[in-house]
Image (spheres, coloured by chain):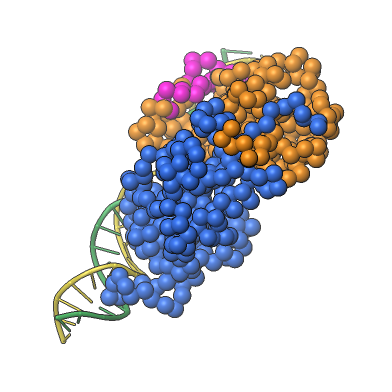
Chain colours: A blue, B orange, C yellow, D green
Amino acid sequence: MTYSNKDKFYLAVDCVIFGFDNDQLKLLLYKRDFEPEIGKWSLMGGFLKTNETLDEAASRILARITGLRDIYLEQLSAFSELNRDPADRVISIGYYALINSKEYSAEMLKQYGAKWFTFDEIPKLIFDHTEIVNRAMKRLKRKAKTQPIGFELLPSQFTITQLRNLYEAIYQRELDPANFRRKFIGMKLLDRLPIKDMNHSRKGAFLYAFNKNKYEAHTSSGFAFDLNGI
Amino acid sequence: MTYSNKDKFYLAVDCVIFGFDNDQLKLLLYKRDFEPEIGKWSLMGGFLKTNETLDEAASRILARITGLRDIYLEQLSAFSELNRDPADRVISIGYYALINSKEYSAEMLKQYGAKWFTFDEIPKLIFDHTEIVNRAMKRLKRKAKTQPIGFELLPSQFTITQLRNLYEAIYQRELDPANFRRKFIGMKLLDRLPIKDMNHSRKGAFLYAFNKNKYEAHTSSGFAFDLNGI
DNA sequence: ATAATAAATGTATTTTTGACATTTGTAAGC
DNA sequence: GCTTACAAATGTCAAAAATACATTTATTAT
């Protein structure tokens, strides 16, 4: 073959899976089910196969454990330290996924020993997975400011307060409720539904839905989703 | 071995090399010197070796052609489409480098058939290299707004006008000279040197140098390099 | 009818942006 | 040596955005 004098490598995909629940940002981890380090907490991972792209491998791995398809998934970075996996040289491509945590299959999670962790209770992870998680968190923070990816973590209908709680969890600081509301509604990307969520107040809070069409129509005319000042 | 039933892959590194010269942002390309597609314009690339990380491979490849070490280099993304290289399955990790184009070794470039191109004269490139270039350009635009990476493209001493020309080249739009100057000087990251560049005006323009120490001192106390509004 | 309370709107101050006008410092031409 | 030319540097001011609170609103439970 053309490149037969070149080295070949095992290629893995490791997924950082974010969820949002009870006003907290969470991470889905599972107990590794093969050697080495079997039984230790780990990101969801697997090896790339010859007949698939990295994106396809990441989707496959995610579907295997959560049962979910068509999830927001984005490549993070390649991790290639020589001894990151002590068993053999493996280059890993990190991914991160955003899922609406109400939708995943609970049985599937149980079957794979998977569990949601808040950020202050993340256990020690195998290999360089803690680093991958940190990189994913950094990326989420950055990306959430300039692209409407937060909605991936919420149910399709949500109150402005829920949306604010999500951003407060991502940025890890409090946001002024009045100013947040004004900023978001001013973007004209949300449709207000004629429904109120009466669970958290007497007055009730209107439910909103993210309108992807409006977003795309806006962006094509130079509009920028920008949450820098919230 | 532990993972012996898994597939292995060729791993390549391809570098998008940015330079800045004559107020223009440029790209360094070379004529590929091995089959397939030998003689066609291409990014600088090479295969990963077992004893090196991806960052090391990228540095090695860059040094081989430009003669430069210690260059600003950052990983972009992995490219894994099944037939991106028609000769064999190769997963490529894209990198981008920023170099002060006055420093590179001209002989080295000639030896490798390398050439600088402005963005409107980039030729057809092999494989998916055009896509890698586009991704790199997008990344540079984004990154330049929130991190002081622009300085990597300039000589160590520069005038505010030069700095503005650089940002105008990156953002591809004109910036108000007065406002740009104020914004940048207000950041307090530049040291004004007691030297004037007399080449472009009667009055002469003071030279400045980026002060990395000041930047790091600032950042640790919550300061953010932010060129969103220029 | 009233109290309680999160949701929603309002308001005032400060900061930042954006566009343009003015002054400054120097070399070259007379 | 005086004037001219001109980018560099500084100044000005209105509009927009961010920030910090204050107030009103809609509803249910008592």
**Of D26 and A212, which appears nearest the observer?**
A212
Q: In x, y percent, where is residue A8?
A: 68, 31
Judge left or right: residue A201 versus residue B52: left
**Of A107 and D3, which appears nearest the observer?**
A107
Figure quadrant of residue B61? top right
Q: Residue at x 48, y 46 (%)?
A: A33
The answer to whether one can see residue A192 in this image is: yes
Q: Which residues are magenta?
A: B192-215
Q: Residue at x 72, y 20 (%)?
A: B65
Q: Is residue B5 above or below residue C11?
A: above
Q: Residue at x 51, y 55 (%)?
A: A65
Q: In x, y percent, where is residue B199?
A: 64, 19
**Of D11 and B157, which appears nearest the observer?**
B157
Q: Is residue B86 above or below residue C24?
A: below
* Residue B181 falls within the magenta-colored stretch: no
Judge left or right: residue C11 versus residue A230: left
Q: Is residue B109 above or below residue A15?
A: above
Q: Residue at x 35, y 50 (%)?
A: A118
**Of B36 and C30, which appears nearest the observer?**
B36
Judge left or right: residue A25 versus residue A104: left
Quadrant where the N terminus of chain B sits is: top right
Q: In x, y percent, where is residue B146?
A: 50, 38
Q: In x, y percent, where is residue A43?
A: 47, 45
The answer to whether one can see residue A133 in this image is: no
